Amino acid sequence: MMPLTLAGIGEVNIIRKVGGNEETRRFLENLGFVAGSEITVLSAISGNVIVNIKDSRVAINKEMARHIMV
C-alpha cells in the first residue's frame, strides 16, 4: 500500500483506504474516492495530481492525495 502521490502516471490502481479526519474522508468520498474504486493518475505536478475516477477527471492537491492509499 502506498499514497496516491507515489503512483505512476497512467497506472490503474485500486483505492485501498481513504484516511484523514472525518471531514477530509467525507469530502473525498463525495468526489468518488472510495475503497475498491479504480483510479488512474493522468498527471502529477509537484505532488498535485489529476486523476481519472469513475469516468470523471478530478484534480486534488498533495495534502488530499497523501490520504488516499492505493
Image (cartoon, helix red, strand yellow):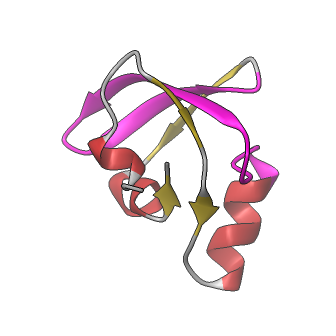
Q: Residue at x 74, y 52 (%)?
A: 34
Residue 67 lies within the magenta run: no
Which of the 4 quarters of the picture holds residue 17?
bottom right
- The residue lying toward the viewer, choosing from 66 and 2, is 2
Against 49, is 47 above or below?
A: below
- The residue lying toward the viewer, choosing from 64 and 1, is 1
Q: Residue at x 80, y 53 (%)?
A: 30
* Lateral position of residue 27 relative to residue 21, left or right: right
Q: Residue at x 42, y 56 (%)?
A: 1
Against 43, is 4 above or below?
A: below
Q: Position of residue 3 (x, y in %)?
A: 38, 55
* Lateral position of residue 30 relative to residue 21, left or right: right
Q: Which residues are magenta?
A: 30-54
Q: Residue at x 67, y 57 (%)?
A: 28
Q: Position of residue 41 (x, y in %)?
A: 44, 26
Residue extending furthest toward the front = 1
